[in-house]
């Protein structure tokens, strides 16, 4: 009888250890990264076609954060107000994501790449880098929750 109890106890012990130590398998939808990258490209296309303001207002999450030079982070409603006050009639802003990644949960991700700012009526393009952190809404649509960019790649004068 003691051997049976010992065998039963040992079996329960090893099974329970395996149960509690087994990691949950999280499977990320392989389309998440592709969809997020496509959202970033659509965001850029809207900026190019309808203006930076319209695009940034369309794609910002209600709690989104903007990081701008020489300013504290601009958050949520203040970020939306900041965007509304911007004038984007003097330039065209477009970008191309280089790559990105999505968390295993499939809810957050990031993209980064190169942007090009072209002032109207000038033969100069200003290039820089950017990073956006994205959050997937319940509907499946991606919105950025943090956006930041910086100059630094340089200017290119377009030959006429």
Image: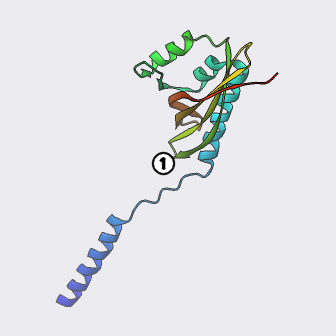
Res 54 quadrant in image: top right
Question: Of residues 156 and 18, which is closer to you in this image?
Answer: 156
Q: Determine if residue 30 is in view.
A: yes
Q: Quadrant of the C terminus?
A: top right
Question: Of residues 86 and 136, which is closer to you in this image?
Answer: 86
Q: Quadrant of the N terminus?
A: bottom left
Q: Is residue 35 above or below residue 61?
A: below
Residue drawn at x 76%, y 24% is 158
Which element is circle 1 on? loop
Instruction: Residue 10: give x, y in percent of width and height.
Output: 25, 80
Q: Determine if residue 1 is in view.
A: no
Disc 1 packing (10 Å; few <14; some 14–19; many ≥20): few
Residue drawn at x 59%, y 27% is 59
Q: Is residue 58 above or below residue 137?
A: above
Q: Is residue 5 above or below residue 109?
A: below
Residue drawn at x 20%, y 90% is 3
Res 123 quadrant in image: top right
**Residue lying furthest left in this view?**
2
Instruction: Residue 67: give x, y in percent of width and height.
Output: 46, 25
Res 121 quadrant in image: top right
Question: Of residues 118 and 52, which is closer to you in this image?
Answer: 118
Kindly identify which residue carries mark 1. 105
Left-right relation of 68 to 129? left
State the count of labels. Answer: 1
**Residue lying furthest right in this view?**
160
């Amino acid at each position: 009888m003691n051997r049976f109890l010992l065998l039963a106890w040992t079996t329960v012990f090893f099974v329970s250890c395996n149960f509690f130590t087994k990691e949950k398998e999280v499977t990320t939808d392989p389309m998440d990264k592709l969809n997020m990258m496509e959202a970033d490209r659509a965001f850029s296309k809207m900026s190019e076609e309808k203006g930076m303001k319209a695009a940034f207002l369309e794609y910002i999450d209600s709690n989104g954060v903007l990081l701008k030079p020489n300013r504290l982070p601009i958050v949520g409603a203040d970020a939306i107000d900041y965007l509304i006050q911007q004038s984007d009639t003097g330039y065209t802003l477009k970008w191309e994501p280089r790559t990105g990644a999505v968390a295993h949960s499939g809810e957050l991700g990031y993209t980064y790449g190169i942007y090009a700012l072209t002032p109207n009526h000038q033969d100069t393009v200003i290039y820089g880098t950017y990073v956006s952190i994205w959050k997937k809404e319940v509907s499946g649509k991606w919105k950025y929750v943090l956006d930041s960019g910086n100059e630094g790649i340089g200017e290119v004068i377009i030959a006429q």
